[in-house]
Image (tube, rainbow, N blue to C red):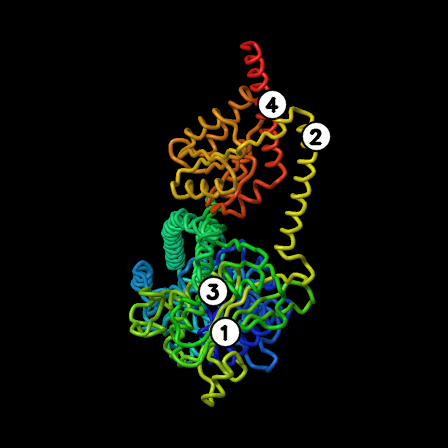
Amino acid sequence: IIYLKSGKPNNLRTLSIHNRQTVAKITMSSTNESSSSNTGDPNLGSDNRYSLGYTTERVVAKTQDSSITAGLDAADADGKQLDWVLTNFDKKTTEPQSLEEELKRLQALRSYLILDSEREHQFERLTALAGRLMKVPIALVSLVDLGRQWFMSNRGLGDVRETPRSQAFCSHAILSKEDILIIKDAKLDPRFVNNPLVTGPPFIRFYAGAPLETPDGYKLGTFCIIDTKPWPDGLDLDSKQNLRELAALAVEVLVARREKREREQEKNTQLVACTAHDLLTPLSGIELSLHLLKEDEDFQRRLTERHREGMTKIEACSEIIQEICKSVRMTYAEARSSFEQSLMKAQLERVNINELVDRLYTVMEPVKKEVPIKIIVDDNVPKEIITDPSKIFRGAINYLVVACQRTKKGMIALRLFIEKDSDGGKKSIIFVSCEDTAPPVELDMYDHLFKPTTKGISLVPKDETVGTGDQTVDPELCLFSVACEMNIVGGEYGFRPRDEEDKGCEAYDKEIGSVTGSVFWFCVPCTELEDSSPTASDEGDGMNAAVESSISQHDASKFHSLVSGDLAAANFVRKKRALVIEDSNVVRKMLTKILTKLGFDVSQAENGMEGLEKLKSTLFDLTLCDFLMPIMDGLDCVQQYRDWEKYHRPWIKQRIIGISAHATPADIQKGLDVGMNDYKNKPVTIKVLSELIKCEKQVEMSNRLDEIERREALVRDGVSDASNSENN
């Protein structure tokens, strides 16, 4: 059996083997078919936190194409019945749903995060009350999912938690035009006379179900009562009202439950975001220290090749940790007023595949492992793509860590390949699959994959876990992290046993004479770039050339003004000045060291008030100002200085660059509005500062200060000469 995951876990569990194979076919062809659900769009799911994923949407499309909307026979190409399709409906009392409506209903159902959860006493009390009040042996809170109906509460059916959707009375109830679906005698109703739930256990004869309609108008399921004997008179008015009230109470519990869960999730995410922010300051210090060491020629001469490799790995890992921290901060900070929408935004960037592979090797090198790792990039993968680099990198690392923990013999192979759109466009899907030669995953573990850690259940025995140093990594959390990341970008993920078609570990298969191991995979939308498009480094070289050209021209124009003056003034050399306004002592010192190395005389201020006084007292070539500081923050400091500058120094405007590790686009714009000239993300590296001081506006600022102080020197020299003449 191939175990498939799509969007949320377990949504395909109740499908028959034939229909699982049908879903597998739809999955495998998902990148080769055009679909009305826009599954090839890289922005799929970006506005909805509860994306269904490619497979689910295509299965629903298959369902709708052969059900009420199309009015066709509910059979696939092989002529076999698809067990999630509703065919025996009453056209007079049924309200057809479009594909779009059913997709939205399923998304709404998933937004309540209730499927496959444990029993909860609020719902149990309601069904117990219904049983006593209505005098029935069975009362259910039933949710209609893809391919199944799932019971949040089940009073009278034992341990049963779900049944196939095609057999569910509730599938008819959520499409009924009536507010309550009442079946007085199922054996007399042509829709249910041959239903296995009528002809076999629990031998349903009477059914009444009121839909669980959300405040948004989606019918997620029903609150229903069932009896094993017919009710010829149906329900009286009071009983109908009681059933409606019970359904409304169940919906209120659902809504309150979701609101509580979202509050808790936001609180937890705030904690994670704050932790990520707190990590950025020491990480900035680490990165700046590494840059200084790399620029220290004496230090570099003393290093061996092994030491240089170690520094490179430290630098790469530091950058990766910073990217993760910034991603977490950005995820939460981009839309504080719309938390759920911010969780869904993918950060689309250019991804250089060769650089991605190099980083994967670098990060995995120190991880303890007992078998070699190789990374395979298929020929059809272009040099660069546009996608979310963080999601691909983190997903691949998590899979590799799990494979290292599980695999004791053989090898591990990570493969990247592209599935192109059938319409010939540039939008495609990049697949990342991780093959290992570990023992097969136990069948009992299937339901626990891609879920948070379950007590007493582990993919790897605890005494066999490995990690870096004394730290061990939880493989279940690694897989759960992949699931969360893929859900954010509308991606897909899964697991299956290896077979003969998986060639990544073929050498070991030949050695032992059989195929063993597993394949963990995920895929995300991407856009391919033309091979001829310039790389980032090419663009950077062109930019630097343009800057150098403009600087040279500017210096040439200044040369004539210099030579026209006094010869001593022409030889005047001024020490450039910089001001660092930053509350973090570590960052402040590191920036000071870098600027000093670049030829600046650096002043420091540890808060906005101190920085304001220094700005008023001295003209600086460059000022770096943090956003968030005690006493007075950077925005107030800059705004107050610009107001002072208008009246006391209108003839020149100092250059102030805002710096921050977590400023949102709105924060950056506010900084520019109050008077900052530019913005740079922390950590501000040597490369960033070098480019900053070479830019045309910065050179112009320094040249203006050169001219001002040259003239002041001329005046001083003139006064001094006059004084000496008088004395003589």
Q: Which residue is mark 2?
A: 560
Left or right, residue 514 beside residue 452 = right
The 10 Å Cα crowd at callout 4, few under 14, some 14 to 19, many 20 or more, is: some
Cβ atoms under marks 1 and 2 closer than 8 Å: no
Residue 51: horizontal and vertical position, in percent? Answer: 51, 60
Q: Which residue is mark 4?
A: 711
> On the image, which quarter does residue 546 sit in?
top right
Left or right, residue 715 beside residue 623 = right
Secondary structure of the residue carrying numbered label 2: helix
CA gap between label 3 and label 1 equals 12 Å
Q: Nearer the viewer, residue 195 or 474?
A: 474
Residue 570: horizontal and vertical position, in percent? Answer: 63, 29
- Residue 263 visible in the displayed image: no
Secondary structure of the residue carrying numbered label 1: strand
Residue 482: horizontal and vertical position, in percent? Answer: 45, 64
Residue type indicated by callout 4: Arg
CA gap between label 4 and label 2 equals 15 Å
- 437 in relation to 396, above or below: below
Residue type indicated by callout 1: Lys
Query: Sequence order check: which comes first, mark 3 or mark 2?
Result: 3
Q: Which residue is mark 3?
A: 362
The 10 Å Cα crowd at callout 1, few under 14, some 14 to 19, many 20 or more, is: some
Q: Nearer the viewer, residue 105 or 554?
A: 554
